Amino acid sequence: MMNLSVHHEPVTQRRNMRAIRQNFMFGRLGNKLFAIASTIGIARTHGLEPCIAPMYSKDKTLTIFKNIPFCAGDEEKLTVWNIPMFSGSITPEDASDSTTDVEVKGYGCSYTFFEDVEEEILSAFEFTDDLKKVSKEFMDNHKDSIKEDSIKVGIHFRRTDMISFGGLYGPFPGTDFYKHSMKIMREKYGPSVIFLVASDDVEWCKAQDFLQVEDVLFIDQSTVEDFAILKECDHMIIGHGTFAWWAAYLGASQKGGDVMYFQEDIEKPVKNKYFEADKFYLPKWTAVSNAGETEADTVQEVKV
């Protein structure tokens, strides 16, 4: 079977054919963004016009973005292209020869699907003015902690589902990973550092001794508000999941900031056969270990 890499410049538009994202199947904000971004990247690579099924224009997690390309009009006959969840390539043998609109299936959780069209992705995922105000108001309301010269480091703790389902991304990072990453940030940027902590289990975070310190501020807003505030951070420490990945990609990574992720994802084999860590984390991001203090938490095998 032929592998059609997306590591090349987009080709000339083929008539009015479209690459359509019909169904997100499952997943929350981060997975949806990968689905949309991979559709845009694959479409541009193969000379198609990307669009997202109009039913998703009312999705509350997507209405926070200004420029997602939703389809105008109904689709006709579709050729289906399936992409593995983490692969950086598409595999149908006739991908370059389709004469119909194409339905892209699968999440495409790899930056390699869209690295050649980064500016288009950043434009698609520009926040609405209302959401931009949310992050500004948060910063203004916490001026005692977030000063003009503060260096904002976002931290996201993904827990809940990932505690048991974490094998999707490799061994689940323990608290020592976060402690080590915070230590590195403090040593590198000094006393101006302020850590902004978000989580799907913020009460657990608030109960952790290492987070009960003066340079830590809990965001504790809604999911999309957490996302918007994390995007405004200068640097990021990310755990598992695609939510933090996108907050880092759209925010700190574009500013030239540091993005730190759990090193064990690279060093230890992952039981999910589709996961390709070197195609998930950007090469310029930094892998950080537990600093030899403890082993990573183990997780069950994941079948996708």
Image (cartoon, grey):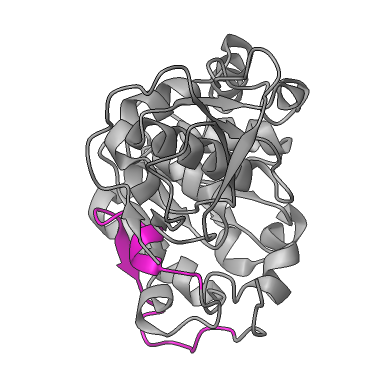
x and y, in percent, of residue 78 in the image: 62, 36
Residue drawn at (36%, 36%) of the image: 46
Question: Residue 100: within the magenta?
Answer: no
Is 69 in front, or is 98?
Answer: 98
Q: What residue range appears in magenta? A: 274-297
Residue drawn at (33%, 36%) of the image: 45
Is 154 in front, or is 77?
Answer: 77
Dividing the picture into quadrants, the one containing residue 129 is top right
Residue drawn at (68%, 13%) of the image: 73
Residue 282 located left or right of residue 160: left
x and y, in percent, of residue 55 in the image: 76, 24
Please give the count of numbered marks on the rendered protein: 0
Q: Quadrant of the C terminus?
A: bottom right
Residue 215 seen in the current view: no
Q: Quadrant of the N terminus?
A: bottom left
Question: Residue 280: within the magenta?
Answer: yes
Residue 291 seen in the current view: yes
Dividing the picture into quadrants, the one containing residue 183 is bottom left
Q: Is residue 180 above or below residue 264?
A: above
Q: Is residue 26 above or below residue 12?
A: below
Residue 23 located left or right of residue 194: right
Is 163 in front, or is 278?
Answer: 278
Residue 256 located left or right of residue 264: left
Is 75 in front, or is 88?
Answer: 75
Q: Dominant secondary structure of the magenta stretch?
A: loop
Dividing the picture into quadrants, the one containing residue 184 is bottom left
x and y, in percent, of residue 105 in the image: 60, 48
Residue 48 located left or right of residue 18: left
x and y, in percent, of residue 268 in the image: 41, 85
